[in-house]
Image (cartoon, rainbow, N blue to C red):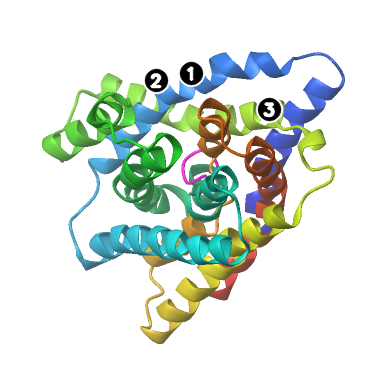
Amino acid sequence: MQERVLPALLIFLSGFLLKRVGILKPKEAEPLVNYVLFFSLPILVFREVRKVQLSHETAGVVLVAWGTILGSLILSFLFGKALGMEERTLRSFLLVSSFGNTAFLGYPFTFALFGEEGLRFAVLYDQIGSFLLVVSVGFSLSRGSFSLKEVLTFPPFPALLLGLFLGDLKFPGFFEGFLKVVGDSLIPVVLFSMGLRFETSHIKGVAGYTLLSLFIKMVLSPLVLLLLLKLLSLDSTGYRVALLETSMPPMVMAGVLAIKYGLDERLALSSIALGVPLSFLTTPLWVSLL
């Protein structure tokens, strides 16, 4: 398993080290992120969702996504209220404890551990499960309102609908080749860009709330899911990918939302910064336990 995860870690570290020695700057990650969001991610979603066959397993993966996120939201809210968090801190705490980095890190981890077969389940978990809750519950938590426009105009979502509509329609060989090359480029580009954006300064003086959010997101949620899957004897590829995605660290978007809407920025950024390197240790462990 280490042989599969270490290449992803090396790509991440390469971006970080090239920034530290001054060859590249953090701002140069922005066009890479835009490339992923507006080009390679929609292409990958379109490519993979066409291969999905409706089954109990695919439905189960989506239900796991909804169940774990909503369960984490309820648990985080109870913890936050019990600890007397102020509103802006509580809202940040809910975001980082419940919504995972299921695309930017989830896809690379899934591809490394499960290959093409697992990637389509990761797309289902991320797009139909996590994404729909992020743009509804997550955005509403951040700004106090829901926007259907945010859902319909986020590039991967139209790609998802188009892929589901076209199904197994065969395209000419050159176009299928285009879909493969562009989709496959997402993994190294996104890992490299995350390395460029990673800042060790966000980890300094990590508060207890940060550690608690990571405990809920990366330990408690996957542990409960692991026990449930073992109880029900569900250990197929789809459910193993669902466990992997559930164990992902807090989503990068949580930091963006915290900054944009005046939430507890330090809590969000420290949770993201500490969660990313930890995931290279914890995620393979969770997958090996199922």
Mark 1 crowdedness (10 Å alpha carbons): few <14, some 14-19, many ≥20: few
Residue that appears at 41% across and 63% down? 68
Residue 279, given in percent of the width and then of the height, sits at: 65, 53
> Which segment did they paint magenta?
100-105
Residue 197 disc label: 3
Q: What amino acid is at disc 2?
A: Phe
Where's the N terminus, which quadrant?
bottom right
Q: Are marks 1 and 3 in contact (CB under 8 Å)?
A: no
Q: Verify whether residue 102 appears in magenta.
A: yes
On screen, residue 95 above or below 159: below
On screen, residue 218 above or below 199: below
Q: Is mark 1 on a helix, strand or loop?
A: helix
Residue 34 disc label: 1
Q: How far apart are marks 2 and 3 (CA)?
A: 19 Å
Mark 2 crowdedness (10 Å alpha carbons): few <14, some 14-19, many ≥20: few
Q: What amino acid is at disc 3?
A: Arg
Q: Distance between the residues labelled 1 and 2?
A: 6 Å
Q: Do the residues labelled 1 and 2 touch (CB within 8 Å)?
A: yes
